[in-house]
Amino acid sequence: MSRRYDNYENEGELSMSMVKRSFIDTVIGAVMCAVICLGLVPDGSLYAKELPQPLPEADQSGQRFITIDFDNVDIQLFIKYISELTGKNFVVDKAVQGNVTILSPTKISEEEAYKVFESVLEVHGFTTVESGSVIKILPSARARSQNVEMLNTGESKNPQDKVVTQLVRLKYASPDEMKKVLAPLVSQTSVLISHAPSGMLIITETMSNIQKLLSIIKVLDVESREEEVAFIRLENSSAEAVAKILTTVYQKSSGAQQGGAARSFGEAVKVVPYERVNALIVLASGSEMSRVKSLIATLDKKGERAEGNIRVYYLQNANAVDMAKVLNDLPETMAKGGTGTVQGKAAAISKDVRVMADEETNSLIIRATKDEYVVLEDVIKQLDIPRRMVYLEALIMEVDADKSFEVGVEWTADGTFSGGTGQLLSGFSGSDGFTNLVDSDGNTALSAGSGLTLGILKQGVRIGNVTFANLGAVIKAYKSDSDVNVISTPQILTMDNKKAEISVGENVPFITSQNTTASLQDYTQYEYKDVATKLSITPHINQSNVLRLEIETEVVRAKDTTATPTTFKRTATTTVILNDKSTIVIGGIIGHDASDSNYKVPILGDIPGLGWLFRTHTTSSKKTNMFIFITPRIVRNPAEMAAVSLKKEDEMGKVLPAVQQELHKEENLEHAMSLTRMGYEKLRSGDTAAAKEFFTEALVIDSTNPFALMNMGVVYEKEGQPKKALEMYQAVASGSSDAVANSSSEPDKKPVPLKTLAQENIDRILRTK
């Protein structure tokens, strides 16, 4: 068979001159090969020191094996060598230039040598195109438009790196959709065409890559069951590794591997790893696709560091500094207790855990492993809850010891506190502050022992034969009584377990030293001291809404206002337990004010012997008994806080002239309407729980408020309590109010009487039963 190795400039144009040159080139090539084989080329030349013979002798099986080992050889000479070896005729484009290097220490067959030849050409951007009895060698970009070999569906050849055109007829899939999937997988110089009318794909690509594309098409071209195809690129994980994990996950429903690299998971999911671009091609139903994508996204995450994991937790209610102290002590506490579980979790917290507080953002910076963080997060959520508050009203007053002042209290010797029954504590230093103590039945036979006494009032404040509804009534009753001095009426709001301090008084100057200079100038130094009434209360609320109050009182009074005044200090410290809205009274803090005064007629009062006729000396002594009344109220939610605020605003804006008006004063009904409006806004925003709290407070003030009743019925319906809702609507329907529904929320509708709406709701509920 004759061999031909030609260079050409215009494709398809072979002239006689080219044939002649072919003969000359053949002669020159033979001479060069002879020189090379004789070792005439020095080291570092085109070929290695020892080159295989172009035509080696065949072994017993008829196969010829050669060793290809070239170092920086001109590609033209390499093509010439392969032409001599295989007996093929090549026509080389003038653009085929450059040097090649091939390292092959072992011998290979002639057939394998030609495959290596095609691979070398592909690496350098060239390819082969068969044209009759010759093979064209030209740039890959131009090869797609040449007369390349065409293969139909089902035809296949051994994978080679030469360019061919493959026709693929699809059975189920759309050619356009398949093209979208395959487009990222072909090289830039390849051709991929979809022909929808015939249901075919036309692919011009190297034979080796076409084999991979065919395996992918085989997996994807299946009967449609509303399936989707997704091309998912991986950022951190290996496509092959993720595919193996998915195989394990779906192993119960997995079928046999298809197409070599393809893994199928039953009939629902099919995954093809494509290592070239580190991506997965997923075929799955619409419902299953989202789960597969979620699983792939979870697997394709950067691996967490084994130690030093840092997370930030933003607190909603608790203080970050206090919370950090508790959590940092937790590992040591658990170690002493011998347990590492929190609500059934077995993960322990090691001493390596660190929790730091950021006060600016009220957040925790936690360094812990993942398992330890889960335990800490559970503890934090249980501690980071809204704290209840306590609204404290206090009345501090002094009463002349000679005045009949009787305070009724609830007494028990050593009973438990429940249902409003009081608890008596006594034994403080001082003298008896109660002139007459009455029990819950009105008997006056009881008497208190000596010392400071303390009692809890069951209902209101009873002084003598008059029962006052609250501390405000006491203030109004005795504000004009000269024998009763109201020192302070402080009110304060504090959180559960937080100390509240109140101080009312003045800063009085006290002379510490006096000097007179030689020029008869007086110099006086003063020291300022607080002369005040201080009250410190720390409330503690248990789960049954019973309060424990830690009370500290201090009363400092100036004894006289002379040049060298002295102070009288009275203190008391105690702890009491009482129910919400009960009143505690502390009495028996006795004060003794004694004063001496001199009056004289100027000049005459200083006459020796007779001066006493013109001057007077008087001594006065007065004892006072101090009473401290404290009423705590638990504030559980914003609705209760709003009710307290409205009530206090109303009290501050009104001054009632008589005690009877204070005793029989009715709650301001406008407060109920204000709370109902607040609850309605919460209901419109979808916060049913908060709305219920506001309506409840409104009904406490005005139990017949039709708007609060109507909206509470709506809340009960939303909670699935039709019986309670029916009670609310029936109360509106049978009430005496002629109120109408506000049309501002529905401008297009005319105002409707609430009774009508209530009856409609009643009928609707009864029909659904």
Image (cartoon, rainbow, N blue to C red):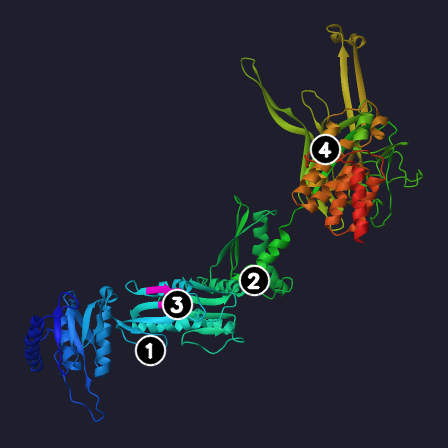
In the rendered view, would you say 385 is above or below 397?
Answer: below
Residue at 33% from the left image edge and 78% from the top image edge: 156
Q: Earlier in the sequence, mark 2 or mark 4?
A: 2
Q: Mark 3 or mark 1: name the one nearer the start of the chain.
A: 1
Within 10 angstroms of label 2, few (less than 14), some, or many (20 or more) residues? many
* Residue ID at (41%, 76%): 259
Mark 3 element type: loop
Q: State left or right for residue 436 relative to residue 13.
A: right
From this view, report whether residue 668 is shown above or below residue 216. above
Mark 3 residue type: Ser
Residue 198 badge:
3
Inspect the image, locate mark 4, and give the three-letter code of the amino acid beneath it.
Leu
Q: Is residue 199 magenta?
A: yes
Image location (x, y in percent) of residue 663: 85, 30
Kindly report the distance in space between the C-alpha atoms of the residues bearing marks 2 and 3: 67 Å
Residue for badge 1: 156
Magenta span of residues? 192-201
